[in-house]
Amino acid sequence: MMSLNRSCFLGNPAIAGSSSPFSHSQKRRSASLKVVALVPKARTGERNGSVVMESTLQEVKDESSVVELKSTVHGGVQDVYGEDTATEDQFVTPWSVSVASGYTLIRDPHHNKGLAFTEKERDAHYLRGLLPPVVISQELQVKKMINCIRQYLVPLQKYIAMMDLQGRNEKLFYKLLIDHVEELLPVVYTPTVGEACQKYGSIFSHPHGLFISLKDKGKILEVLRNWPEKNIQVIVVTDGERILGLGDLGCHGMGIPVGKLALYTALGGVRPSACLPVTIDVGTNNQKLLDDEFYIGLRQKRATGQEYAELLQEFMTAVKQNYGEKILVQFEDFANHNAFDLLSKYGTTHLVFNDDIQGTASVVLAGLVAALKLVGGSLADHRFLFLGAGEAGTGIAELIALEVSKQTNIPVEETRKNIWLVDSKGLIVSSRKESLQHFKKPWAHEHEPVKELVDAVNAIKPTVLIGTSGAGRTFTKEVVKSMASLNERPIILALSNPTSQSECTAEEAYTWTQGRAIYCSGSPFPPVEYEGKVYTPGQANNAYIFPGFGLGLIMSGTIRVHDDMLLAASEALASQVSQEDYDKGLIYPPFTNIRKISAHIAAKVAAKSYELGLATRLPEPKDLEKYAESCMYSPSYRSFR
């Protein structure tokens, strides 16, 4: 409620008539105004759902500390707000004290309740007259806001409205998102967040996260300390080089960490004050952005090599120094050549997680485990073909190989041989091994070269086709029909985001397979009617995994991520698919139950962490699932007194 990290002599509007920093001029001293400071008597805390704030007023007696102001209008009132002197040089930096009372309270998104402030709260916190007289419930506010959001026909307008609400009333934002998660998830995350990142400079109004650029080299610890919240538990960081399937968006990639962390809170229950979105700005190679007058990042080509590595090293060192050993750092949308290196480099020294590599792998594996109920057999009985051999493709492939190895006790080197990958040059085979990037080499099997995907399908005869290429409409009619001719129930996962980059649409998959496909996409598609039957496509959305996975790490005090935790998360998610879901052809549960699903995943991840000896929060809770639910943030309003 009260922050006195940077103190100043600034009046509360109910006391001094102002919430703005005062200007100071050494030239004008004919009329003076004494300003009081708020000195905390007891630390602000939250007890029994109520926010307690105790403070006393202490008049500043030192005359050298008195701020003196004079109106420039002859015969007018004193320039209390500093408006007439605002253009003059200020003698001191105008730090402000955050006081949860009066005018400041309704402009603090963490505590603002809007028209839900009660009559007692309005009297106690100097709100009388600052709000219309009506008092309404949070439920009515949610109803009003969802009606407002639905008025917008353009998804980007809905996104802007949601971000505006997050900046005004944090609890209402999360209450709205939780209550209407299936409707609003595509707004705050994929696919709309992709367009938001493309146009981030044009729609940018105020920062939602921390921007660290090459200009901050040598000062990153200081920059981290500028963030107002100190008890950070999870950081989502991007350098913007590979945003979804849209490529290099530079500093505009901030929409991704902001969106991911909104889901950490809404779906996983991690407190918003414990979440920090970060963009590392090392420039961009996107000439269109460099020429855009609204671009908000560094106008230079991307830094690479030693310069890049040193900046990331300083960032990772500063993060641990500032927030401790148990801070979770989630790498997001880094280009392949950096993503694998960063995960490998810091995986042994930090609590790090790459959602594109590990999160995608875990959610896809969960879908495949669930799909076995529809097609029969075990994972070892199936053959997998990927289009795309980047972070997502190789990450999924490796986790499948690990799960099969775990189930069969066959070495992972052997289980990989049932998994084939196609990249831009064709099927990855042993004759190409010397020219392959290191993360592709384990997938170079003995086979003659194959250039086209449809030829690879006919040669490999996969039961599962997975697209992670970032290239739209690459699962052509010929490819899908080939899968249908080989399998009674072909499993087709078109995972690239946003929807424009999906390898094929739900309608194409169901139509070209006569309704026999088990289909999932990365971004949502509407239900499809084919020959009188309605098919509901699934969504292999990382939002099923990473919020619960992160909660499990945080609540157990885990210090390192282990592959077995990812397998535990996959199995936990697969177990949440009901018979009713299977009857609809779904291999993922509905998002309406996502908080319970996340608590179940968190419990399984935490249990695995305790089993591996990586958890530090001791003793281990007896009922981890109940403990996970008890740790979850609630967006319901609290009473102020």
Image: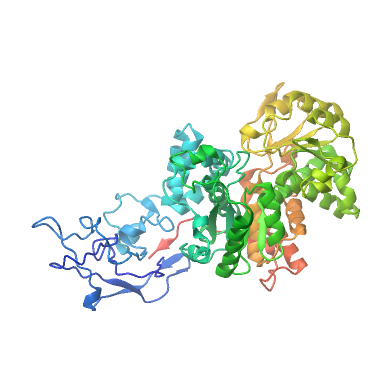
Q: Picture coordinates of residue 412 (x, y %)?
A: 87, 53
Q: Nearer the viewer, residue 406 or 113?
A: 406
Q: Tell me, what colour scheme is on the image?
A: rainbow
| Residue ranking furthest to the top | 531
Screen quadrant of the C terminus: bottom left
Relative horizontal placement of residue 86, taking residue 158 as reference (left or right): left
Task: In this rendered view, identify the residue nearer to me: 170 or 390.
Answer: 390
Q: Position of residue 589 (x, y in %)?
A: 69, 44
Q: Position of residue 366 (x, y in %)?
A: 75, 47
Residue 618 position, x and y percent, is 68, 73
Quadrant of res 268: bottom right
Q: Nearer the viewer, residue 495 or 132?
A: 495
Asked whether residue 30 is in view, the answer is yes
User: Is residue 635 visible to us here?
Assistant: no
Q: Residue at x 51, y 35 (%)?
A: 155
Residue at the far left in the pictured view: 75
